[in-house]
């Protein structure tokens, strides 16, 4: 899903005072049907959700149904709506899905990379003053044996120096597609003078925001399957169902996490503070870090408060190679936003 924001007539304004439109091709539902999985709570159709938002809040939200890989559709949408800000979530979001086989890997690469390229070309041609806020992921960095800087790395070599996008070693075809996105966006800013903010988020947890609490029809997606679900979601469901929480190996893999409310706060701050023309800003976003075992123990402790005795089960690690622990840096600006923490250990993650 891509959300476009601009100034506009009062009848179209959102709760924060902006005109809002949604661009979606509803593909997530098709992927769920393909794999035979579904979220814990049913997600209403896009029309029902837009109607619910209008009923409880008043503002209308426009919807444009189409695919970002269709360049003509992207062009016509931007020509019609003329956004000031584009918040880009419209990609295949699962590392396991991208690694099923060659077909799924190819689909993920084409869907994500071509869709973002089309958006960049349409911005250049139709809305060059728009600010792109792109959902990245900490998993782009991989697990290098040097500190992970925030987006960029200055290299000194033979008495000269240059600042590059931080070299990335992702662990899946999904994460690799996001790396390609980052390089393409950097090119568009550097060569075409576009403006963009790349938000490299850790694993997002939580299912409620102030807005979704207004009406059950606005509920967010809670996946706990092995393709779209996170380890935390799976642990919660396993604990409640009386199944052991499966931790692979010693459970020492460390990930950065942030609550969904912090996620949206970061997006809002990025939208309110656009990057200068010709610049790609990068923020690493996480508020806390846990090992997988620590995460399981936290779920176990929370279950006890509900009168549930949850068990932790260790299983052989299918990828038994030793992972390095690195340091991820976030700028003071990102930390002051409540969306980053300086010098905290982390490694690759799947949002």
Image (cartoon, rainbow, N blue to C red):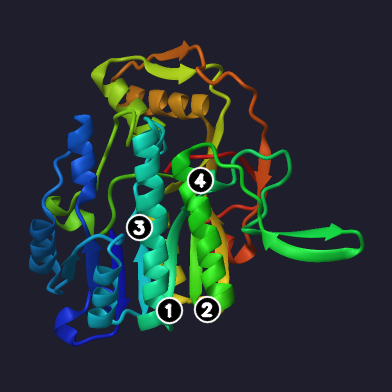
- Dot 2 crowding, Cα within 10 Å, few <14, some 14–19, many 20+: some
- Circle 3 is placed at which residue position? 89
- Dot 3 crowding, Cα within 10 Å, few <14, some 14–19, many 20+: some
Query: Which image quarter is the C terminus in?
Result: top left
Residues at marks 4 and 3, CA–CA distance in whole angstroms: 16 Å
Secondary structure under tag 2 reads helix
User: Residue 23, percent across and down?
Assistant: 24, 65
Q: Is residue 206 above or below residue 135?
A: above
- Please name which of the two marks, 1 or 3, marks the residue nearer to the observer: 1
Asked whether 326 or 110 is in front, the reply is 110
Residue occupying the far bottom of the picture: 9
Q: Is residue 12 above or below residue 311?
A: below
**Residues at circles 1 and 2 in contact by the CB criterion of under 8 Å:** yes
Q: Report the residue at 29% width, 85% height from top.
A: 7
Residues at marks 1 and 4, CA–CA distance in whole angstroms: 24 Å
**Residues at circles 4 and 2 in contact by the CB criterion of under 8 Å:** no
């Amino acid at each position: 899903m891509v959300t476009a924001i601009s100034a506009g007539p009062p009848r179209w304004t959102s709760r924060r005072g902006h005109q809002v439109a949604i661009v979606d091709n509803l593909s997530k539902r098709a992927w769920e049907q393909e794999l035979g999985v579904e979220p814990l709570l049913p997600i209403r159709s896009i029309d029902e959700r837009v109607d619910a938002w209008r009923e409880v809040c008043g503002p209308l939200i426009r919807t444009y149904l189409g695919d970002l890989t269709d360049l003509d559709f992207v062009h016509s949408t931007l020509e019609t709506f003329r956004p000031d800000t584009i918040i880009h979530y419209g990609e295949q979001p699962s590392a396991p899905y991208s690694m099923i086989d060659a077909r799924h890997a190819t689909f993920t690469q084409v869907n994500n990379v071509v869709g973002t390229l089309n958006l960049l070309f349409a911005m250049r041609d139709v809305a060059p003053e728009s600010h792109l806020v792109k959902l990245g992921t900490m998993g782009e960095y991989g697990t290098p044996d040097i500190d992970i800087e925030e987006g960029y790395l200055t290299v000194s070599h033979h008495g000269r120096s240059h600042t590059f996008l931080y070299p990335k070693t992702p662990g899946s075809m999904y994460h690799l597609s996001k790396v390609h996105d980052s390089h393409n966006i950097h090119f568009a800013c550097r060569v075409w003078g576009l403006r963009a903010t790349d938000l490299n988020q850790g694993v997002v947890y939580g299912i409620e925001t102030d807005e979704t609490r207004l009406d059950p029809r606005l509920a967010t997606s809670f996946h706990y399957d092995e393709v779209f679900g996170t380890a935390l979601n799976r642990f919660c469901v396993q604990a409640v169902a009386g199944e052991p929480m499966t931790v692979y190996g010693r459970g020492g893999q460390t990930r950065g996490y942030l609550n969904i409310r912090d996620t949206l706060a970061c997006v809002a701050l990025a939208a309110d503070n656009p990057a200068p023309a010709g610049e790609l800003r990068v923020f690493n976003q996480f508020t806390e870090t846990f090992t997988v075992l620590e995460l399981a123990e936290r779920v176990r402790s929370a279950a006890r408060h509900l009168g549930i005795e949850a068990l932790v089960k260790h299983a052989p690690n299918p990828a038994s190679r030793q992972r390095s622990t690195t340091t991820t840096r976030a700028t003071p600006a990102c930390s002051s936003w409540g969306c980053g923490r300086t010098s905290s250990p982390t490694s690759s993650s799947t949002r």
